[in-house]
Amino acid sequence: MKWLVLFSIFLCMNDEIIIFDKNNTNQRWYITNDDVMGGISNSSMKLDEENKMIFSGNVSLDNNGGFAMTRLPVSINLDDEKTKLVLKLKGDGKKYQLRIKAKNNQRFWYIQSFQTSKSTEEIELPVHKFYASFRGYKLNVDNFSGAKITEIAILIGNKKKEAFKLSIEKITLK
């Protein structure tokens, strides 16, 4: 809990809130793969030698599996000026989801998909375009309009067997 309080006192520079960058590496990312329901996909979230977070692994469809996810508890208070989450990353040409929660006890995620290229790029995801989803089904709930983000996650689940690697340099709220 102590790190969560410290984490909520972000370095605010140039009108952005830094969620992750190479100077903010003492975070505890958690892995949640399809093994929670019998699948055998695997993944890890590790720092490389340049302090970039590497989310990598293998998605398997065996045993009704098909996804890998990494997630980070946060405490981010939103205001009207911060309207988009920005990912600076190098992808592998695959599609991923960025997921957010507005409350700790919320069972569903607000999600938005993004396509990666094999080059370093910045991907901007407007906060108001995150839609509610539970276990792959879109819910009849308004898009995200919360005043707080309590957890973020990155998920890959493209309904196919595949290896993946995402190199994350920075995640900010602008």
Image (spheres, rainbow, N blue to C red):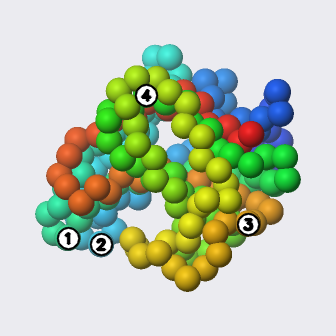
Residue 97, position in %: x, y? 45, 53
| Front label number (1 vs 3) | 3
Q: Which residue is drawn at 24% across and 60% down?
A: 159
| Residue type at numbered disc 1 | Asn
Label 2, label 4: how far apart the Cα atoms are: 30 Å
Q: Residue at x 75, y 66 (%)?
A: 146
Task: Give the residue at mark 3.
Answer: 145
1 or 3: tag closer to the N-terminus = 1
2 or 4: tag closer to the N-terminus = 2
4 or 1: tag closer to the N-terminus = 1
| Front label number (1 vs 2) | 1
Name the secondary structure under disc 3.
loop
Label 1, label 2: how far apart the Cα atoms are: 8 Å
Question: Where residue 159 is drawn, which disc sits there?
Answer: none
Name the secondary structure under disc 4.
strand
Asked whether disc 2 touches disc 4, contact meaning CB atoms under 8 Å apart, the reply is no
Label 4, label 1: how far apart the Cα atoms are: 29 Å
Residue 93, position in %: x, y? 32, 35
| Residue type at numbered disc 3 | Ser
Which residue reaches farthest left? 62
Asked whether disc 1 touches disc 2, contact meaning CB atoms under 8 Å apart, the reply is yes
Task: Give the residue at mark 2.
Answer: 37
Left or right of 96: which side holds 4? Answer: right
Label 4, label 3: how far apart the Cα atoms are: 29 Å
Task: Give the residue at mark 1.
Answer: 64
Image mark count: 4
| Within-10-Å neighbours for mark 4: few <14, some 14–19, many 20+ | some
Which residue reaches farthest top? 50
